Amino acid sequence: MSPIRLIDETGAQRGVVSTDEALRMAREAGLDLVEVSPNERPPVCKIMDYGKHKYLQSKKTKQKHHEQKLKEVRIRPKTDPHDRQIKLGKAREFLRHGDKVQFTMIFRGRERFHQDLGNEAFNEIANELADIAKVERPAKMLGRRMTLVLGPTKVPSPSRPTPPAARPAKPPPSAAAPAPPAAPTTPASAASAAAEGPG
C-alpha cells in the first residue's frame, strides 16, 4: 500500500511510513488512522479517536453558527412594576440565547429633567439581571433617550450532539486480512430472521 506521512496520537511527526505500519500502530493504540491532508504527497494521516474528533468538529461548527444580535427593550421612566417584570423576562430570554440587550428609555416633556429616575431604573435592571448579564455600555443620555447595553456573561452552549458510543470500525490492515467477525445477532434481528424463514 502507498506510503503516508504519519502524525501519532501525541501529535509527534513519525515521518513517512507504510500504510500497513500506520494501521498497526493505530490498532495498538486502540485508535483510528484518519487522513487529514489528502492532497499532500504523500498524504498526511493522523492517529486519533475519530468519533471524538467528529464530535468536537460538530460542536465547534454549531458554536460558530450563532450570530450575536442586539435586541432592544423599551421602557418608560415610570413603567409599571408588572410591565417592567414582563420586559425583564423578555430581556432574560434574549440573554440566555446569547444576544445583547439594549434598554432604551424615552423621556417626554418634563421627564427630561429627571434623568436620575432613568439612572436609578437602569441600575435596578442591571442588578436584577446580574446573574446572567454584565454591563457592556453604561447608561448614556442621547437627546431624549437614555440607553443601557447588557451582554450575556457567557455564550450559551448549543444543544450538544450525543457523543458516539463506539469508535468507527477500523480499516483492515490489508486486502488479504480476514473480514472482522459479524456482530452478534440481537433479539430483534433473530426474530426477524425466524419470521422470514429460509430463502
Image: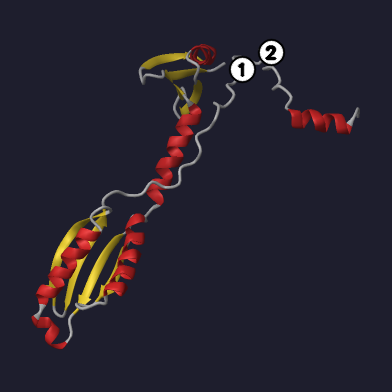
The residue that appears at 18% across and 85% down in the rendered structure is 108
Secondary element at tag 1: loop
Protein image colouring = secondary structure
Residue farthest to the front?
A: 82
Q: Which mark is residue 68?
A: none
The reply to whether discs 1 and 2 touch (Cβ–Cβ < 8 Å) is yes
Residue drawn at (18%, 67%) of the image:
122
Q: Nearer the viewer, residue 64 or 22?
A: 64
Residue at 34% across, 69% down: 86
Q: Nearer the viewer, residue 174 or 50?
A: 50
Camera-nearest residue between 137 and 87: 87
The residue pinned by badge 1 equals: 172
User: 156 or 67, which lies in front?
Assistant: 156
Q: Position of residue 112 (x, y in %)?
A: 12, 82
**Where 172 falls versus 37 (above or below)?**
above
Q: Residues within 10 Å of mark 1 (few under 14, many from 20)?
A: some
Q: Which residue is mark 2?
A: 178
Along the horizontal axis of the image, is 187 left or right of 87? right
Mark positioned earlier in the residue sequence (1 or 2): 1
| Helix, strand or loop status at disc 2 | loop
Give x and y (percent) for residue 31.
Answer: 49, 20
